[in-house]
Amino acid sequence: MPVGEGGQPAPPGAQDGSAEARRQFVLRLLADGELHSGAELAAHLGVTRAAVWKILRAAVDELGLELSSIRGKGYMLAAPLELLDPVRIEAGLSDLSCGLLGGLEVLDSVSSTNTRLMRRARDGAPSGLVCLAERQLAGRGRSGRRWVSPFGSNIYLSVLWRYPLAPAELGGLSIACGVAAARALKAAGVADIGLKWPNDLHWRRRKLGGLLLEVAGESQGPSHVVVGIGVNSRLSPGQAAGIDQPWTDLASALSDAPDDGRGDVRPGRNAVAALLIDALFPALIEFGNAGLDPFLPDWRAFDTYLGEPVALIMGERRITGTCAGVGADGALLLDTGEGRRAFHAGEVSLRPIATEMGQVSAATPKSSGS
C-alpha cells in the first residue's frame, strides 16, 4: 500500500486521480521545509516525476508559495509551513472552551470564514461554532476592505455566538473581543501588544491583526454575531505587497521571546488559534452577562494611542484632538478644542499624528490592508 507521512498510508484520493487530494498531500509532505526528492513524492502519489512537477507547479501558482527546485535532488518550500490541525487545536483548548465548542471547521480554502459562519448561522448552526481556513479568497476587513489572506501564512478565525439580546444591545462587543484577542496574544508571548480603536491589533505601532464583527437577528432579540479575527503569522514581503500601512507578523513580534533552553518554544499557528478561542469564549459570555464595563480597564492598558494626538478621518472630513480612550458604550473619546467628543465606528478611521520639528500633520488616510 502506498504510504504517506510517517510511514502511514496515503490519504484517500492521493492516488485515485483527485487533483485536490494530491495537492494537499504533497503540501503536507513539503510543509516541513526539508528537501524531498521527486522520486519520493512520485512514489507517495503513484505518479511519474513529471506529473509531480505539474502538481507542484499548479499548487505554487494557485497558492502563491515559494518553491525551490534543486536539480537532481528534489524540491523544498522556501520556509516551513505549520498547517492547521483540528486535533492539535482542540487539544490546546481549556476544559471550559471544549464544553462551549459548537464544532470546529478547518478548511483548506474558503471565500471568507465570516461569510461561511453567517450562512451557517442562518441555517441554524449552534453557538460556539469555530471556522478556520488556510486561506481566504475574499477576506474582508472593516468597511469591506480587502484582507490579505495568503495560504498557510496567517490565522483566519471566526466564531459564531448566539445571544438572547437585541442586536442594538451588542454595541461595544468589538471592544470586548479586541481585549480578548490582545490578552491571547500577550499570553502567546507577544510583548508590547496594543489595540487601536476600533478593531486593530498592533505591535509597536504596526498592524499585527484585526477584527471584524457581523451581527444579525430580530429587532428585540435573539441575535447572533460572528467574530472574525485575522492575525499575521508569517508574511513575506511579496505576500504583504497589498498592505498599504505599516504591518508586522507574529514571527517578528515573537523573535525576542525567551527560550527555555529546550529549543524554539514560540507558539505556532495551532497554539495561537487555541489561545484565541480560549480568550474569546469567556469574553463572549462575560459581555452577555455584564456588558462592556469589565473590559474597559484592559482596553485602557492596551490602548496604543491613549493620550496622544490623533486625527479622525470621516470621508473628506478630518478632526484632530487627543485620544482620551473609549466610553462606556465603546465610542472613541476625543479631546478637541471644543471639548470632549464621542465617535462611533462605521466609516470613522483613526490615524496618529506625526510631530516633527514642532510641525503637526495628519498621516495621509489610506485604505486598510486588512
Image (cartoon, grey):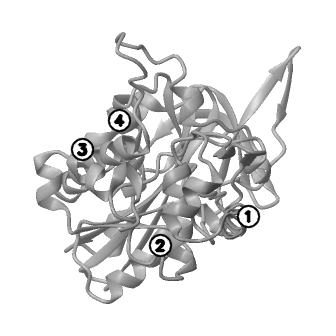
Identity of the residue drawn at 34% across and 87% down: 122
Gap in Å between the C-alphas at discs 3 and 1?
35 Å
Residue at which label 3 appears: 92
Crowding near the residue tagged with mark 3, few <14, some 14–19, many ≥20 C-alpha atoms within 10 Å: some
Of mark 3 and mark 4, the one earlier in the sequence is 3
The answer to whether residue 102 is visible is yes
Residue at mark 2: 14
Q: Is residue 241 left or right of residue 309?
A: right
Give the residue displayed 56% in from the left and 32% down from the top. Answer: 251
Q: Residue under label 4, please give it.
A: 183
Amino acid carrying mark 3 in the image: Gly
The residue carrying pointer 2 sits among few (fewer than 14), some (14 to 19) or many (20 or more) residues within 10 Å by Cα, namely many
Mark 3 or mark 1: name the one nearer the start of the chain: 1
The Cα atoms of the two marked residues, 1 and 2, are separated by: 17 Å
Q: CA distance from mark 3 to mark 4?
A: 16 Å
The one nearer the camera, 11 or 85, is 11
Does label 1 or label 2 sit earlier along the sequence?
2
Image: 352 above or below 40: above
Label of residue 57 in the image: 1
Q: Amino acid at mark 4?
A: Arg
**Camera-side mark, 3 or 2:** 2
Mark 3 vs mark 4: give the one in front: 3
Which residue occupies the foreground of this view, 215 or 72? 72
Could you tell whether 118 is left or right of 35 in the image?
left
Asked where in the image residue 233 lies, by quadrant, the reply is top right
The answer to whether residue 340 is seen in the rendering is no
Closer to us: mark 1 or mark 2? 2
x and y percentages locating residue 67 in the rendered image? 71, 49
